[in-house]
Amino acid sequence: MMEARERVSPAPHKLAALEAWLGEGTSIERYELLSGGAVQLNWLIEGTRAGTPFAYVLRTDAASSLLMSHSRAQEFALLCAAERAGVTVPTPRALCEDPSILGAPFFIADRAAGTALASRVVRDRNLGGDRSKLGEILGAELARIHSIRPPEPSLDFLGFPSVSPALDVVESNRATLDELGVARPVLEWGLRWLERNAPAPAGLVLCHRDFRTGNYLLDERGLTAILDWEFAGWGDGAEDIGWFCAACWRFGNDELEAGGVATRGDFYRGYERESGTRVDPDAVHYWEVAAHVRWAAIALLQADRHLSGAESSLELALTSHLVPELEYEILALLGGWR
Amino acid sequence: MRIRPAGAELLSAARVTLSERIVPHLPQARLERIASIERAMAAGEEKLARDLPASQAELRALNEARLAMRDLIPDALPPEYHYDARLVAKAIAVAASQLVRGNADELREVERLAALLGLPPPALGTPDDVRCSLAGLNERLASRIRSGAADAGSQSYDATLAHLEATTREALSESNPTYHRMSSGAAVPHTSAFRARSAKRPSLCCRSSSRRFAGGADSKARGCVDG
């Protein structure tokens, strides 16, 4: 969501420590804050090591943390697992858990080219190559993420659903609403429907849980990286398909129901070809309802961060005014306005 | 005020963004324009905070401020601050919509909720009373839905869905009146500003307020936040 960018002056003592950590003969020539969210900060660092140029993204924690998200060490493990499964990710290079270098743990990965900015991705046809092909590629990428299954020792920090992935989503979103103390009858309507229609637990796969337009990078030729792994966990693969196709992530480009960039047919075809399994439209419909409920709960949480004074931000404050749109979609998916 | 932060809180946050992230990056020649934008926002914030309707001139000034933040100011700003200007414009739009709509939607929602829940219409005094009743009634409806008492097949299913549709239409008209996916059948016309039902019965509300109420806003200014 953070689209505003700003330049922040590097702290000289931290730069020196980082250069030493990166290895002898390292010189950092550029250091720029790419994006700063409530949860993580992404820095671009460019320089040379023993005469060879490098460009890395360094990812570290913001001072405060918004949601239950993974630590940098865990995110690094997820990136490594995804890379092994053939997912297009920024190549993970190194993890530093020693807080004395930058003040917080961090990891570095190769900088991937391209833009993630959703408003550009859905409109600028010079990005991402042929859109039908892009839809297939994104479907295949998601299928490769879902090829990661438990047991996976490097991901043993990921918890398992207590009852079923679907009922866990119902429970956790109800808990969020209760903690916030906001009564939202439409969200309760959606949650009750999700509770009554929860699918039986199927085989668990690695779900990205934020696989959507805005969280992958495109350049002129095509996809260059799947980003933002901090919410990944074991779950029902249809959850990610529903999240990607949900109306709230099309950024105004409604004709292309798969993320505003491709048709469902393109996206499903890529997924089915790679995974060898059929996409079940009923399951996707279920998880699209869940997607709008979950995004609404997150939007209310973000507004609460502003209202509580934890992080004063006009962007967080305005996020809550997306909730009526999400409620509109929930009712529309569940038979409203007929 | 269905969604917090409400208009006054949004304008307050938007004024901080204006002074901290926009003004420092503007050329001298634009600062006079910013001062008038700031004045319009401050006036709107004050009216919203006190539950008073805005004058036609104040609504016009807010609309001009919104258009300037959307169309004019970005041209004078470095690209990395365009997003901030758009956020300020959006905050003004929501606040102006609340000023125009007042609490008529909330009064209707309270009446609908009481009927749906089979309760007598609550006695309402101040706009704070209305908000308080609304919160309490929505808690009841939320727990009724969660308990399954309004499930498909139950007697109250149709009435509950109709209430949720009406409420969502009104909330969208406040937060995003031009939501592109809203079907024309779901759109709701603008209504009038702050009012309270005359209530002789004692208020059931948790808070009391001695605020005064004012009559409707000027209808000519309505629709100023569209687009």
Image (cartoon, grey):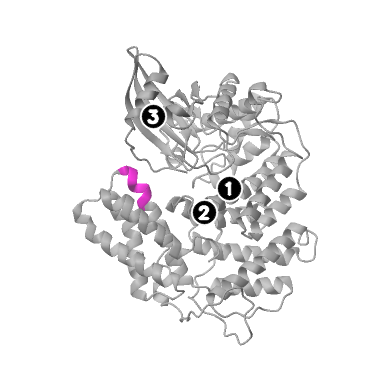
Does the segment drawn in magenta span residue B84?
A: yes
Residue most extreme to the top: A50
* Chain identity of mark 1: A
Q: Is residue A186 above or below residue B211?
A: above
Dot 3 corresponds to which residue? A44
Mark 1 or mark 2: whose residue is earlier in sequence: 1
First-in-chain label (3 vs 1): 3
Mark 2, residues whose alpha carbon is within 10 Å: few (<14), some, or many (≥20)? many
Dot 3 falls on a residue whose secondary structure is strand
Horizontal relation, residue A275 to residue A300: left or right: right
Q: Position of residue A217 (x, y in %)?
A: 46, 31
Q: Is residue A152 visible?
A: yes
Q: Dot 1 corresponds to which residue?
A: A295
Say above or below: B203 vs B81. Answer: below
Residue segment shown in magenta:
B79-85
Q: Nearer the viewer, residue B70 or A99?
A: A99
The answer to which of marks 2 and 3 sits earlier in the sequence is 3
Image quadrant in which the C terminus of chain A is located: bottom right
Report the amino acid beneath label 3.
Leu
Q: Residue at x 55, y 27 (%)?
A: A73
Label 1 packing within 10 angstroms: few (<14), some (14-19), many (20+):
some
For disc 2, the chain is A
Q: Which mark is residue A303?
A: 2
